[in-house]
Image (cartoon, rainbow, N blue to C red):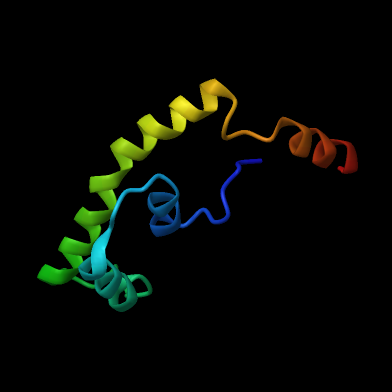
Amino acid sequence: CLHLKSAGLAKVCEHYGLRTGEHYASLKKRYQAADWRRRPLTGPMIEYGLYDVHYLLELRRLMMRDLTRGQLWDLEGTMDREEEA
């Protein structure tokens, strides 16, 4: 179990102090539930997708750091769930 309140990208960025900004928040509100199968994608849809990708590499580095330090993983919580199953 990860020590994060939410697994959403914006919340994980917030956890690590990565600022997504108001522009990202407005794009997210508008395009998160959009039909991404429709083509062509609009300029703002592409921009929203780029924001998502922009943070992934840095978040991977930060999360790997915390996982290896034992700061992000709740081993006891994982073991409790395995016993319940």
| Residue 59, image x, y percentages | 36, 39
- The image shows residue 63, relative to residue 10, as above or below, that is above
Tell me the residue at 59%/25% (across/down): 70
| Residue 34, image x, y percentages | 32, 75
Q: Is residue 59 left or right of residue 82?
A: left
Residue lying at the far top of the rendered structure: 68
- The image shows residue 78, relative to residue 26, as above or below, that is above
- The image shows residue 23, relative to residue 75, as above or below, that is below
Q: Is residue 46 left or right of residue 26?
A: left
Q: In which quarter of the view is residue 30 placed?
A: bottom left
Q: Quadrant of the C terminus?
A: top right
Tell me the residue at 54%/56% (across/down): 6
| Residue 50, image x, y percentages | 20, 54
Q: Quadrant of the N terminus?
A: top right
| Residue 15, image x, y percentages | 45, 49
Tell me the residue at 75%/36% (across/down): 78
Q: In which quarter of the view is residue 33 placed?
A: bottom left
- The image shows residue 19, relative to residue 71, as above or below, that is below
Q: How many marks?
A: 0
Residue lying at the far right of the rendered structure: 84
Residue lying at the far bottom of the rendered structure: 30
Q: Is residue 55 left or right of residue 83?
A: left
Q: Which of these two is toward me, 43 or 62?
A: 62
Q: Which of these two is toward me, 84 or 63?
A: 63
Asked if residue 26 shows in the view, the reply is: yes
Asked if residue 40 shows in the view, the reply is: no
Q: In which quarter of the view is residue 41 placed?
A: bottom left
Residue lying at the far left of the rendered structure: 43
Tell me the residue at 25%/69% (across/down): 22
